[in-house]
Image: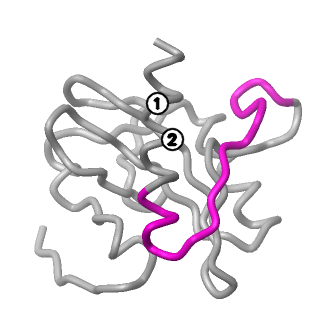
Amino acid sequence: MKNKGTRFERDLIAELWKEGFAAIRVAGSGVSTFPCPDIVAGNGKVYLAIEVKMRKKLPLYLSSDEVAQLEKFSESFGAASYVALKLPRKKWKFFTIQMLERTEKNFKIDDDIYPLGLDLKEAIGKIIQKRFG
């Protein structure tokens, strides 16, 4: 499963480079004693900290600690934080921490939240779409 996750991270990095962002996978993300996202990207104006997730189906659950670590890194680094979610045969969707639904102990993205996700061009600030929800 880890190899598949790495492949998806690399695919997203390639898409970010195509959009003019320098992007790297962060070694040790998820196991470091310091908060660190899966991908860090920037173009000199916009900086992103991205936690990458893939699922066969919704919902996606994220631990409170995972979200807090992403938020902490992003604030320290000066980056916008996103959870990037890839579902089979769908394009990447990006969710800010504020978009995530709070559960009793964690956070989730379900069928109600998923349609509100941003596409890559929206996440990097190249286009803005109105969403109704």
Other-residue count near label 1 (Cα within 10 Å), few / some / many at <14 / 14–19 / ≥20: few
- Report whether 19 appears left or right of 44: left
Disc 1 secondary structure class: helix
Where is residue 1 drawn, in percent x and y? Answer: 46, 12
Range of magenta residues? 15-32
Q: Is residue 60 above or below residue 48?
A: above
In this rendering, position of residue 48 left or right of residue 26: left
Q: What residue is drawn where x is 82% and y is 65%?
A: 76
The quadrant in which the C terminus is found is bottom left
Identify the mark at residue 19; answer none if there is no mark. none
Residue at the location (15% across, 56% down)?
115
**Cα separation between marks 1 and 2:** 5 Å
Most foreground residue, 105 or 36 = 36
The magenta stretch spans residue 90: no
Q: Position of residue 64 (x, y in %)?
A: 58, 36
Q: Which mark is residue 7?
A: 1
Colour mode?
one colour
Residue at 11% x, 74% y: name it: 132
Does 31 lie within the magenta span?
yes
Which residue, given by chain and number where applicable, does mark 2 sit on? 10
Left or right of 103 in this view: 113 = left
Instruction: Residue 111: name its quadrant.
Output: top left
